Image (cartoon, rainbow, N blue to C red):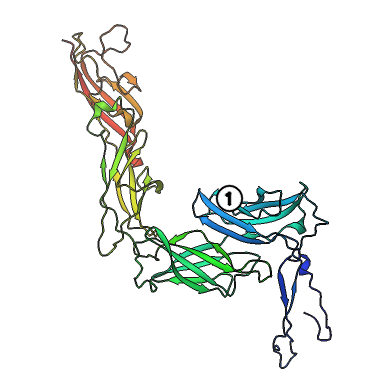
Amino acid sequence: EVPISQLTAVDNFAGRRIPRGVNITYRLVASFPSPGNGLSLFSDTAMVITNSDIPLMTKVDIRTSSTTLGVVDVEWTRPPQIDTLLHRPPFGYRLYRTSTGNVQPILVHETTTLNDTTFTESNLNTENEIYTYQVSISKEGGQATLPDSSLPATAVRLTATPQPRSILLSWAAPVPWSNLGFYHYIFKEIGSEFVLLDSVLAMSNTPTYEDNGRIEGVELNDSTIYCYKVVTKGSYNMPKVRSPLLNQSQVACGTLLDTIPPCKPGPIEIENLVCGQCDSLNGLSEIYNTLTWKRYSDDTCRREPLRFEIRYAKYLGDAYESLAETFDTFYVHKNNNSLAGCYQITAFDLSGNPSTTIEVCNDNCTEINLPNVITPNGDMLNEIFRPLCITKSFLQSFDCQIYNRWGKRVYQTNNPEILWGSVQEQVAFKADAGTYYYIIQARFVKLRREDEKQTIKGWIQVFKE
């Protein structure tokens, strides 16, 4: 912007590099002062073609869309105005690539001739990464200088955005040529092939297209995944540079915007092989709950669940934490030394809508079963006071104290097997005939913290005959 009296101006591109080998067009407009303000009509255009002594990128075409086996075809031009006095043979090209996952330029291809202007790169993640290429001239094996490099060209990036009854496609391709004023082509996967669906005149650098099924005459289905790719069309509008330039995007897929949640899973059933088998717990090396549930579908929720998220809380009332995700209707939870805990299961559909959450809690089946009579008389029957059954796998701590009828403690142990009453001489605590009383303080792993500590009191009758 200059005063009205000034009839010249210098464009230094804000100190940046002047584009090479492209058309640059200028036009003027006059601005009027107050009170009228306003702008004049545009002047005629003036165009300058900068020197074409550098290669020009002409193709970054995604031939194969894949997360691991993607293929990109890259092409560029031989500089038509290369200065052979400055670029003495041997010379060639160096092709560099950057991506969203690696912004540092990587040398992916090198030639020793200016006639080799194509390259195909394989084994790329073309679905998730955005690749940009730039080619430079290398002189006599030396590094290329900045003026010898082309402007970068980026692969077409297509986005499929869900809408309530349609899918909105948008795409962008930062390239040194112009894609404006050309028809771009939209392809849709039908069966196992991509067929031409429609075309749209690109009037901006981010064209859009809405697929609502109108072209095919079929309403889009909210349970179907639709996949697309776009072919852009553009040109340098320069002599001796081929036109049009066609480049294909990656494949982008999407579904309709779905706000209807899936049906909630069926009731959770918990099965284990532990409860009711007290004796087996003493030697059990692995304890686990098997959760099972069902899928449901009706007119209020319709969509079939895609996956299930399982959350778990060790104690009743604790915050739930995510435990696992599964596509099945069962889950085996191996939880070291406990069956206790609460489970939540939520179904999710393809759009990520959650169902109503279902919940179930399970407690450990703890038991201490003690005899009332022992006969430590040497016949090896009922010699020792020990539990008939105790769920040791859920036991955290144990203390047993035995008193005679006058309140004197005659035995104390932290061993959950107790082992009191032996007639063997080497055992320090022997049981004489009479009535004894015991107090057991035990702590088990339970669903409620307040239920973990248990006090058990009882009596034992000792016979010696």
Residue 91, horizontal then vertical, whole percent: 75, 51
From what the image shows, is residue 374 above or below residue 19?
Answer: above
Q: Give the amino acid at mark 1.
A: Glu
- Classify 10 Å Cα crowding around label 1: few (below 14), some (14-19), many (20 and above): some
- The quarter of the picture where the C terminus appears is top left
Instruction: Report the residue at 19% width, 23% height from top.
Output: 372
* Disc 1: which residue: 121
Q: Quadrant of the N terminus?
A: bottom right
Residue 93: horizontal and vertical position, in percent? 70, 52
Residue 247 in the image, given as x and y percentages of width and height: 56, 63
Residue at 26 percent across and 58 percent down: it is 297
Image position of 344 (left or right of 239): left
324 on left or right of 282: right
Could you tell me if residue 23 is visible in this image? yes
Image quadrant of residue 23? bottom right
Say whether residue 337 is left or right of residue 141.
Answer: left
- Rendered position, 139 above or below 154: above
Considering every residue shown, the one lying at the far top of the view is 425
Give the camera-side residue of 340 and 8.
8
Q: Position of residue 26 (x, y in %)?
A: 73, 78
Nearest to the observer: residue 422 or residue 166 = 166
